[in-house]
Amino acid sequence: MTNNNLLSRGMVAVLVAQFLSALADNALLFAAIAMLKAHAAPSWQTPMLQEAFVVAFIFLAPFVGPFADAWPKGRVMLVANAMKFGGAAAMLLGLHPLIAYNLVGIGAAAYSPAKYGILSELVDKEKLVKANGMMEGSTIVAILLGAVLGGKLADASVTTALTAICVCYLLAAGANALIPRLPIAHKLEQFSPLVLLRDFRVALTTLFRDKDARFSLLGTSVFWGSGSTLRLLLVAWVPVALGITDLSMPANMSGAVAIGIALGAAGAASFVSLDKVNRVLPAGILIGLVIIAFAHMTNLYAAIALLVLVGACGGFYVVPLNALLQEKGHETVGAGHAVAVQNFFENFAMLGLVGLYTLMDKSGMPVIQSATTFGSLVLVAISLLAAFRMIKK
């Protein structure tokens, strides 16, 4: 049952579990990159890590939403974190990073609809943007610490990094166990894959016909697709633009983006409500412009300042869009179904943008040019989205 308490036992448990799980997710990426480098893997395998992770979200999207709505979401999150632990442990035991990271992606795909869908079950509509801001804040702090700690631990010892990551997943599962057992949102009547595929198609169609839900789906997809690509692009950009070759610096710069997102998320929670969501559009357009400027930086401190600005624009832009979709989903197809559809769109965007960057890398395109091209794509995509939003207002 929803209430107005943003510090209830359930909310605190969700935030702690999300922090630990996201911390491990982000540290694991840098541990996997370090493992690939230790085995002298080709450079194109680094962006392929993200592809291996997100493909699970796309193929499992029709199934994870209904399951998140058909069982208490705290229990779904617990099982998903156990699956993530299994993937990290497999990497520690020697499984190829691409395969192991794919296993973690399967757990993450199951986890995502539950972690966001549970918010509309814990708080009511008036506090949903603030609850999302708290969730994003927890996630961003975890991204910051996970990237920094993952890079530093992986530089020192991949084995130590992976062991710490496994412990974080186990602690996250423990926090999930403390979430109160909530009522089932939508009982799953049948287990047939064909029925679930049909159910997913209905949910996708229903949401896409709603102008607010469609705006949120497309807007968040561009943001998270660009965020995943930028994080990988930094690994190649830092040595070329700044002459720094260790893995810690790209990780620290990812942390700078995370700091910015936290600031932007806090601003959105204070200044944007669901009925004023168009206020986020200028910030979204700025993301692409700032990435283009960042691509040509050669000064470390100027580059970090621009990355914080990218993150701040992104946090201000994406948090209200998430809340908008959750509210529309809760009113129509179920919050878990809505987040599963969102994951499908977002991870399809990640797959496309990271795939494009992989092709640019394999073709030998200079990384500065790749970053400029990438920023231009983001600028055009969000500008078009904003124009259609305002025309059809």
Image (cartoon, rainbow, N blue to C red):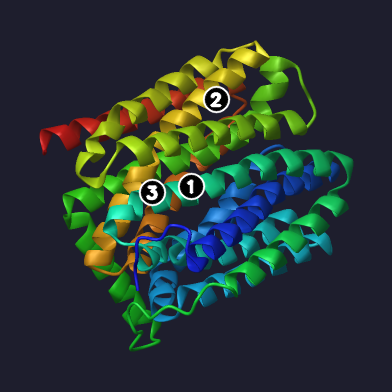
How far from the left and from the top, in percent, is residue 329? 28, 62
Which residue is found at the position 84% from the left and 49% from the top? 158
Q: Please indicate whether residue 230 sits to the left or right of residue 216 in the image.
A: right
Q: Amino acid at mark 2?
A: Leu
Task: Decide: is 348 above or below 88.
Answer: above
Label 2 vs label 1: CA separation?
18 Å
Residue 14: x percent and y percent? 53, 63
User: In this orientation, does residue 362 appear?
Assistant: no
Q: Position of residue 42 (x, y in %)?
A: 74, 40
Tell me which label, 3 or 1, sits earlier in the chain: 3
Which quadrant would residue 33 be assigned to in this image? top right
Q: How many marks?
A: 3
Calculate the distance from the C-alpha at mark 3 to the C-alpha at mark 1: 10 Å
Residue that mark 1 sits on: 136
- Is 208 left or right of 265, judged from the image as shown? left
Q: Which amino acid, by three-letter code, is at mark 1?
A: Glu
Q: Judge by depth and name the residue closer to the eye, 90 or 42.
A: 90
Is tag 2's residue or tag 3's residue first in the polypeptide sequence?
3
Answer with mark 2 or mark 1, whichever residue precedes in sequence.
1
- The residue under label 3 is 130
Q: Residues within 10 Å of mark 1 (few under 14, many from 20)?
A: many
The N terminus lies in which quarter of the figure?
bottom left
Judge by depth and name the residue closer to the eye, 244 or 320. 320
Quarter of the rendering containing residue 249: top right
Element under disc 2: helix
Q: Residue at label 2? A: 307
Within 10 Å of disc 2 (Cα), the crowding (few <14, some 14-19, many 20+) is: many
Residue 15, image x and y in percent?
A: 54, 57
* Cα distance between the residues tagged 2 and 3: 24 Å
Q: Quadrant of the C terminus?
A: top left
**What type is the residue that disc 3 sits on?**
Lys
